[in-house]
Amino acid sequence: SKKAFIFDLDGVIVDTAKYHFLAWQKLAQELGIEFTPEHNEELKGVSRVRSLEIILGLGNLTATDEEKERWLIKKNQDYLSYIENMDEDEILPGVLPVLEYIRSQGHFIALGSASKNARPILEKVNIMPFFDAIVDGNDVTNAKPDPEVFVRAARLLGVTNENSIVFEDSVAGIQAANIAHMTSIGIGDPAILKEAHYHFKDFTFIEPSFIESLLN
Ligand code: G6P
Ligand code: MG
């Protein structure tokens, strides 16, 4: 039966963490909060709203809902200006061959991302045509580690959770896949992806034979 290969976006297909960092840092600076690259690590896979709460927590700052709303809009405007010139050169090494291989074997490809900017980013890097289904931050109410985003993607394709395979760089995303009884593949630092069923430093280490081994 057909499998669903579900990809996270940020940190898996493209490295947008550096742009999120610049935009959050700009806001943090204006609020007088120290925000470091180490802090930024904790925001990977985390929703926009939750990210702001974490940053305010770093500065022991409380804010009204109106202030938060204003800062979230501002952060996203800055983020959009940073990603404006993204193109296909920003697709992470090894991703395209894996997408092509999965497609050549006749399996489904889906996106399962917390980002509300997922669609424009896929357009910019020119890989929209690979995706049979897209579920992003506009479609879900529960953030990872809740499996909603991945389960919705599988449902759209008519594939069971057990026949779904998730590529993720965040701990919360791996947990979400595991909770849904999907196969989880961690991409990135092995130390933080201990719960993944399989792990690769990046996509250049994923051989067709590995993908094939998942098909039985
Ligand atoms: C991904 C990223 C997070 C980001 C979230 C929301 O999960 O890893 O760092 O905060 O998406 O992204 P957005 O583009 O909607 O602000
Ligand atoms: Mg990610």
Image (tube, rainbow, N blue to C red):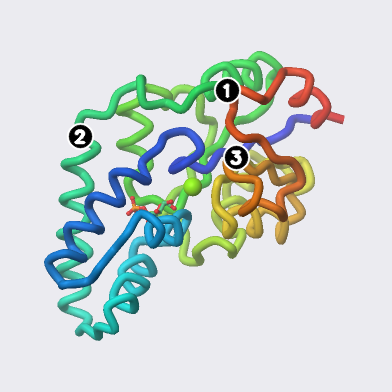
Q: Residue 187 carries which label?
A: 3
| Quadrant of the image occupied by residue 25 | bottom left
- Callout 1: 10 Å neighbours few (<14), some, many (20+)? some
Q: What residue type is labelled 3?
A: Ile
Q: Residue 99 carries which label?
A: 1
Q: Which amino acid does label 2 sit on?
A: Glu
Q: In this view, does 58 lie above or below 183?
A: below
Q: How far apart are marks 3 and 2 (CA)?
A: 25 Å
Q: Which mark is in front, 3 or 1?
A: 3
Q: In this view, does 74 lie above or below 97?
A: below
For mark 3, give the secondary structure: strand
- Identify which residue is drawn at 44% across, 56% down: 41
**Residue 31 location (% of width, % of height):** 15, 72
Q: Which mark is residue 84?
A: 2
- Callout 2: 10 Å neighbours few (<14), some, many (20+)? few
For the N terminus, give its image quadrant: top right
- Identify which residue is drawn at 64% across, 43% down: 186
